[in-house]
Image (spheres, rainbow, N blue to C red):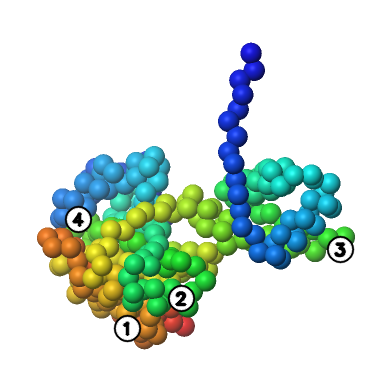
Amino acid sequence: MALHIGQLKKEHLRAAFDCGNLTLNDYLRRYAWQNQERHQIGTTYVAVEESQPLVVLGYHTLAMSEISCHSVPELSAVLKRLPYSAIPAVLLARLAVDVRFSGHGLGRKLLADAFNCSLEIGRQVGCRCLIVDAYASAVHWYSKFGLIEIPGARFGANTKRMFIDLRTVERARI
Amino acid sequence: MVKERALMRFQADLSPKDAAILDSLKSELDIRSNAELLAQALAILSWLVRERRSGHTVASIDKENRVRELVSPFVERAVLDYRLPRVEIDWTPEELANLARLAAGEPSEPTKDLIAIMTGR
C-alpha cells in the first residue's frame, strides 16, 4: 500500500471515514476543514492511498501552543534557564485511523508524521515538546513510543495528557 | 470636513545600547522624531512578515552575488502561525507542576518503537 500523508484539502472525502469513535469521526467530517481554513485553530494531515488519493484512511491534527506559567514554581525554575517566558509546544490534538485500515501500521505512520512535522517546526522556530490529549484506551499505545502521562488532569476529563521531549524524538532518528 | 484621526501614545523603556542605536538611526536617516522612526520600522517589519507569509525569502545580495538570507525567529514564528495555528491548552496546576518536572529533566532515551517509526525499520 503506497501511502501519502499531506494537508487536508477540500476535495478529500471525509463523510465515509469511520474510526469507531464518534467524536473523532465527527471532527473530521464536520470541523477539521473549517478549523483549518476558517478558524485556523488546527491543521489536519490526512493519509491517503496513492491509487485513491481522495479517500481518507487516517488523520492527525496539529496546533502550536505554548506553556506559560510563572505562577507554577516548578516551571518558573525551568523557565529561568530559558531566554523566553514560555515553553513552545506542539499539540497533537487528534489522531485516528479508519477501522477498515487498522492493523496496517497506519497509526504509527501518522504518529511519525506528527513527530517529523514537530521536529521541522522545532528547527524553524524552536519547539521543546509535543503534548497529546489521549483517550484512556490509547495511553498504552502512545507510551510505547515514549510519551509519558502527565498526572493531574481535571476531574472528569475523558482524556489523559501526555508529553514527549522532542530531543528524544530527534535521538530516535539517528 | 476632515475627520481627525485618533493617535495612540506609545512609550518604551530602552536599554542604553538600544537608545544609542535609535539616536544613530535617526541621525543617519535624517528622521527627527521617535514616532517617525517607529512608523518606518513598522512598515519594514510588516513588509517582512507579508513577504515571508507569501513564501518569499528576504535576503541581501552583495556585489559578488553572495546571498545572505534574513531569518528572524520572531518573524518565523508568525509565519508558522499562518500555517500551523496557535491554541491555548487548559492546564491544571497539578499538571503544570508535573510537566515542569518532566521538562526540567534530561530527555529520555527513545524507545524501540519510537526508533522503529522514526527510522522506518
- Residue A104: give x, y in percent of width and height: 26, 67
- Disc 3 residue type? Glu
Disc nearest the viewer among 4 and 1: 1
Which label number is shown at residue B64? 3
Mark 3 to mark 4 CA distance (whole Å): 58 Å
Q: Classify mark 1: helix, strand or loop.
A: loop
Mark 4 to mark 1 CA distance (whole Å): 27 Å
The residue that disc 4 covers is: A19
Q: Classify mark 3: helix, strand or loop.
A: loop
Mark 3 to mark 1 CA distance (whole Å): 49 Å
- Disc 2 residue type? Lys
- Residue A66: give x, y in percent of width and height: 40, 62
Mark 2 to mark 1 CA distance (whole Å): 30 Å
Q: Are the residues flagged by discs 3 and 1 in contact, CB closer than 8 Å? A: no
Q: Is residue B38 left or right of residue A87?
A: right
Mark 3 to mark 2 CA distance (whole Å): 44 Å
